Amino acid sequence: MKLGLVAVGRLKAGPLPTLFQDYARRLAWPLTVVEVDERRPLPAAELKEREGALILQALEKDFRKTWSPAVVALDERGAALDSMGLAQRLARWRDAGADPVFVIGGADGLSSAVLERADLRLSLGPMTWPHQLVRVMLAEQLFRAQSILAGHPYHRE
Protein backbone atom coordinates (compact mmCIF):
# COMPACT_ATOMS: atom_id res chain seq x y z
CA MET A 1 0.00 0.00 0.00
CA LYS A 2 1.06 3.55 -0.73
CA LEU A 3 -0.20 6.72 0.94
CA GLY A 4 -0.77 10.03 -0.74
CA LEU A 5 -1.46 13.54 0.46
CA VAL A 6 -2.73 16.44 -1.64
CA ALA A 7 -2.66 19.66 0.36
CA VAL A 8 -3.47 23.25 -0.43
CA GLY A 9 -0.56 25.54 0.41
CA ARG A 10 2.97 24.92 1.48
CA LEU A 11 4.35 24.27 4.94
CA LYS A 12 6.15 27.37 6.16
CA ALA A 13 9.53 27.26 7.88
CA GLY A 14 9.33 26.40 11.55
CA PRO A 15 8.48 23.41 13.71
CA LEU A 16 5.56 22.04 11.64
CA PRO A 17 7.59 20.73 8.67
CA THR A 18 10.02 19.10 11.09
CA LEU A 19 7.21 17.41 13.02
CA PHE A 20 5.47 16.31 9.83
CA GLN A 21 8.69 14.81 8.46
CA ASP A 22 9.36 13.07 11.77
CA TYR A 23 6.09 11.13 11.56
CA ALA A 24 6.23 10.67 7.79
CA ARG A 25 9.71 9.17 8.08
CA ARG A 26 8.40 6.58 10.55
CA LEU A 27 5.78 5.27 8.15
CA ALA A 28 6.47 1.89 6.58
CA TRP A 29 4.16 2.84 3.72
CA PRO A 30 5.66 5.29 1.22
CA LEU A 31 4.03 8.72 1.43
CA THR A 32 3.78 10.98 -1.62
CA VAL A 33 2.97 14.63 -0.90
CA VAL A 34 1.65 16.97 -3.58
CA GLU A 35 1.13 20.62 -2.68
CA VAL A 36 -1.14 22.83 -4.76
CA ASP A 37 -1.35 26.57 -4.43
CA GLU A 38 -3.39 29.29 -6.05
CA ARG A 39 -1.46 32.52 -5.56
CA ARG A 40 -3.85 34.92 -7.28
CA PRO A 41 -5.96 37.00 -4.91
CA LEU A 42 -9.49 35.74 -5.57
CA PRO A 43 -12.79 36.07 -3.70
CA ALA A 44 -13.22 33.24 -1.16
CA ALA A 45 -15.81 31.26 -3.15
CA GLU A 46 -13.79 31.51 -6.36
CA LEU A 47 -10.57 30.60 -4.53
CA LYS A 48 -12.19 27.49 -3.04
CA GLU A 49 -13.36 26.37 -6.49
CA ARG A 50 -9.92 27.04 -8.03
CA GLU A 51 -8.19 25.10 -5.24
CA GLY A 52 -10.67 22.28 -5.85
CA ALA A 53 -9.78 22.21 -9.53
CA LEU A 54 -6.07 22.06 -8.64
CA ILE A 55 -6.72 19.19 -6.19
CA LEU A 56 -8.70 17.20 -8.76
CA GLN A 57 -5.98 17.85 -11.33
CA ALA A 58 -3.33 16.55 -8.89
CA LEU A 59 -5.40 13.45 -8.13
CA GLU A 60 -5.64 12.71 -11.84
CA LYS A 61 -2.06 13.62 -12.79
CA ASP A 62 -0.10 12.35 -9.77
CA PHE A 63 -2.14 9.40 -8.50
CA ARG A 64 -4.55 7.96 -11.07
CA LYS A 65 -2.03 6.37 -13.45
CA THR A 66 -0.01 4.13 -11.13
CA TRP A 67 -2.24 4.05 -8.05
CA SER A 68 -5.57 2.58 -7.06
CA PRO A 69 -6.59 5.65 -5.05
CA ALA A 70 -9.18 5.77 -2.29
CA VAL A 71 -9.69 9.52 -1.92
CA VAL A 72 -10.13 10.70 1.69
CA ALA A 73 -11.31 14.30 2.05
CA LEU A 74 -10.55 15.83 5.42
CA ASP A 75 -13.77 17.67 6.20
CA GLU A 76 -15.24 18.93 9.47
CA ARG A 77 -18.57 17.31 8.55
CA GLY A 78 -17.00 13.94 7.79
CA ALA A 79 -16.94 10.69 9.75
CA ALA A 80 -15.20 10.98 13.10
CA LEU A 81 -13.16 7.79 13.37
CA ASP A 82 -11.12 7.00 16.42
CA SER A 83 -7.54 5.79 15.96
CA MET A 84 -8.59 2.14 15.98
CA GLY A 85 -11.28 2.88 13.39
CA LEU A 86 -8.76 4.59 11.11
CA ALA A 87 -6.40 1.63 11.49
CA GLN A 88 -9.19 -0.77 10.53
CA ARG A 89 -10.11 1.35 7.50
CA LEU A 90 -6.46 1.42 6.38
CA ALA A 91 -6.26 -2.36 6.81
CA ARG A 92 -9.34 -2.81 4.59
CA TRP A 93 -7.84 -0.58 1.91
CA ARG A 94 -4.51 -2.39 2.18
CA ASP A 95 -6.19 -5.78 1.86
CA ALA A 96 -8.27 -4.56 -1.11
CA GLY A 97 -5.20 -3.20 -2.91
CA ALA A 98 -6.31 0.42 -2.56
CA ASP A 99 -3.96 3.33 -1.94
CA PRO A 100 -5.47 6.06 0.27
CA VAL A 101 -4.88 9.63 -0.85
CA PHE A 102 -5.77 12.19 1.81
CA VAL A 103 -6.87 15.67 0.74
CA ILE A 104 -6.47 18.78 2.90
CA GLY A 105 -8.16 21.95 1.69
CA GLY A 106 -7.29 25.56 2.24
CA ALA A 107 -8.65 28.03 4.78
CA ASP A 108 -12.16 27.87 3.30
CA GLY A 109 -12.32 24.07 3.08
CA LEU A 110 -12.84 21.82 0.09
CA SER A 111 -14.96 22.49 -2.99
CA SER A 112 -18.12 20.50 -3.56
CA ALA A 113 -16.42 18.81 -6.55
CA VAL A 114 -13.65 17.44 -4.32
CA LEU A 115 -16.13 16.33 -1.66
CA GLU A 116 -18.17 14.52 -4.31
CA ARG A 117 -15.03 12.78 -5.62
CA ALA A 118 -14.09 11.53 -2.14
CA ASP A 119 -14.57 7.90 -1.21
CA LEU A 120 -14.56 8.94 2.45
CA ARG A 121 -15.00 12.24 4.24
CA LEU A 122 -12.97 12.17 7.43
CA SER A 123 -13.17 14.59 10.33
CA LEU A 124 -10.40 15.19 12.85
CA GLY A 125 -13.05 16.40 15.28
CA PRO A 126 -15.52 19.23 15.60
CA MET A 127 -12.90 21.92 16.18
CA THR A 128 -11.43 23.98 13.37
CA TRP A 129 -7.72 23.35 12.81
CA PRO A 130 -5.19 25.31 10.74
CA HIS A 131 -4.63 23.34 7.54
CA GLN A 132 -0.87 23.25 8.13
CA LEU A 133 -1.35 21.71 11.57
CA VAL A 134 -3.76 19.17 10.06
CA ARG A 135 -0.84 17.71 8.07
CA VAL A 136 1.04 16.98 11.28
CA MET A 137 -2.02 15.54 12.98
CA LEU A 138 -2.77 13.33 9.99
CA ALA A 139 0.82 12.07 9.78
CA GLU A 140 0.76 11.20 13.49
CA GLN A 141 -2.56 9.35 13.12
CA LEU A 142 -1.24 7.40 10.13
CA PHE A 143 1.80 6.39 12.17
CA ARG A 144 -0.47 5.48 15.08
CA ALA A 145 -2.68 3.37 12.79
CA GLN A 146 0.39 1.60 11.42
CA SER A 147 1.51 0.90 14.99
CA ILE A 148 -1.91 -0.49 15.90
CA LEU A 149 -1.89 -2.81 12.88
CA ALA A 150 1.63 -3.99 13.74
CA GLY A 151 0.72 -4.64 17.39
CA HIS A 152 3.27 -2.06 18.51
CA PRO A 153 2.68 -0.51 21.98
CA TYR A 154 2.78 3.12 20.70
CA HIS A 155 -1.03 3.27 20.92
CA ARG A 156 -2.58 2.65 24.32
CA GLU A 157 -6.27 2.07 24.95
Image: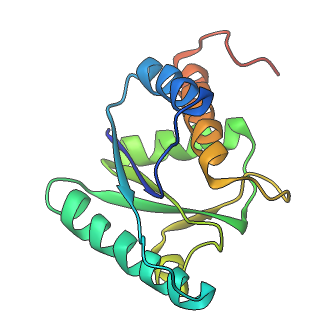
Placement of the C terminus among the 4 image quadrants: top right
* Residue in the picture at 59% in, 14% down: 151
Q: Please count the marks in the image.
A: 0
Return the residue nearer the eye: 134 or 29.
134
Q: Quadrant of residue 115?
A: bottom right
Residue sitting at the far front: 41
> Would you say 75 lies left or right of 12 here?
right
From the viewer's perspective, is 89 left or right of 79?
Answer: left
**x, y (%) of residue 69?**
33, 58
Q: Quadrant of residue 63?
A: bottom left
Residue 122: percent from left, percent from top: 64, 59
Instruction: Name the image quarter holding the N terminus.
Output: top left
Q: Which residue is at the front of the view, 22 or 144?
A: 22
Q: Nearer the viewer, residue 27 or 107?
A: 107
Please say which color scheme the image uses: rainbow
Measured as percent of width and height from the top left, residue 62 is found at 22, 58
